[in-house]
Image (spheres, grey):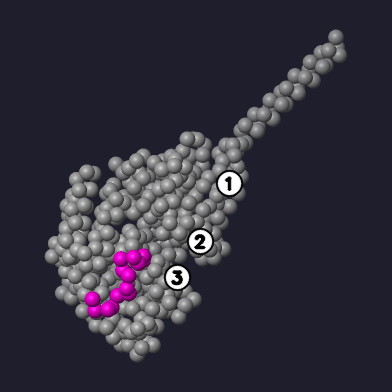
Amino acid sequence: MKIWKSVVMILSLSLVVMGCQTGSESEKTDRDGNQADEKIKLTLWAGTGLKNVEGEDSPNYGDWERAKAKKFSEIHPNVTIEIVSIPWGEIEQKVNVAVAGNNPPDILFDNVPMRIMKHAKNNQYEPLDEVIADQKQDWKPEYLATGMVNDQLYALSLYTQPSVLFINQTLFEAKGLGHLIPDNREWDWMQLKEALKQVVDKNVYGTAFFAKNNQSDQVNAAWLLSGGASWANDDFTEYLLNRPEGVEALSYMLSLMDEGLVAPGASSMQASDSIELFKQGKLAVIYNVPEIYGHVAGSDVKPYGIVPIFKNGTKPRMLNTGENGYALFKQKDENKRKMALSFIKFLTEPENVKAISKNVLGVPARISSEYAIKNEDFGELMKKIKPLEQVNLGKSVPYYADLRQKLYPELQAAFQKSKTPQQALDDFVKSANALALKK
């Protein structure tokens, strides 16, 4: 009997110990105190916007995201994160196909108002409000607005970039035309045209227009608004680009083409083509964002930034773009959803927003992420553009992604002379107003 009691006691103790061990395993937590016994895999698709970011070894696109994913996994050992880097010119189509096939990535880094938000209206995303809840006062409201629908945050923009004109200073100086580069960083329509007439030759184009697709369409908008035109009314219920000022601006663009001052093939050219021409020293001026400094790094081209072009007698105005940021597609697993939100919060901490904003010379979305500009040329340019009037293209309206599909076909028609400037802008405005009416 004593032996039997001893056996029972040993068995009982063994069960208690096993129970404690099982409980211990089920309550295993990571460094943040989150349950960590479930293996979680996240995927992040990122546009090719970031490389050589300060603080991380990132010579190639995707390296910065991988470095951050590794650090996040050190905090959360049960989490693995796959990073897929996709060129800007391809990411929209890839995401569209993935969404249609009900197989999107978990997290997407792309342009928020131009591409990400078109899926928000179809209820494709998880809300991100809890990502910023404890630090909302640090986020600039105008940036948050680009990712909101009915006061719900579905995407988080991290920075914006100004669309400005860059002169190929190397080219002008090599041709003995350095005196044409404006010390006040301003050119009106006539000054631009006269400068281009002097610099263009059989190997050098003046500038480039592109209308192959909707990529970098804020540049086309900047040209069309350069004569003082209004894009739309204040509440974006009526579009106004087809009024005389807009028609005159498009006519001015066509005059540059007619006088041989624009690279050929505008209807089939895309933004990346114009960047390559500028990098090769074949383009005298280019409308672009400050990333152009990085694009030409290692080449002989020295960019000189000036304010957006404007009609003589009017004032230059600013358009901002590049509102790149994160969104989280709908999740079926609650633990995976929480971990994905934690990763987005990790990626958007002030030091990370500062690092990537500094990398692209963008204006950060977080107040605490402001930085000192080291690029001397851009620093001087920023002093000029900060006081300028900001043009609002209504990127926060729910149909903006659809609106972007309406402009470039009309520009193609105008460039190919199948429509007059008035007809092309009339047709754009008609389509835009129809979208506004259906919102």
Check disc 2 and report its element: helix, strand or loop.
Answer: loop
Q: Quadrant of the N terminus?
A: top right
Check disc 3 and report its element: helix, strand or loop.
Answer: helix
Residue range in magenta is 258-271
Q: Quadrant of the C terminus?
A: top left
Q: Which residue is mark 2?
A: 61
Instruction: Give above or below for 101 relative to 255.
Output: above
Task: Work out whether residue 279 or residue 151 is closer to the camera in this orientation and state it.
Answer: 279
Look at the image and say whether residue 268 sits in the magenta stretch: yes
Q: Label 1 amino acid? A: Thr
Residue at the outermost front position:
418
What residue appears at the point 43 percent right and 54 percent down from the top-left corner? 91
| Circles 3, 2 touching at the beta carbon (< 8 Å) | no
Q: Which residue is mark 1?
A: 80
The quarter of the displayed image where residue 390 is located: bottom left
Instruction: Give above or below for 317 relative to 324.
Output: below
Q: Which residue is mark 3?
A: 294
Q: CA distance from mark 3 to mark 2?
A: 13 Å
Q: Position of residue 6 (x, y in %)?
A: 83, 16
What residue appears at the point 27 percent right and 59 percent down from the top-left corner? 409
Q: Is tag 2's residue or tag 1's residue first in the polypeptide sequence?
A: 2
Q: Label 3 amino acid? A: Gly
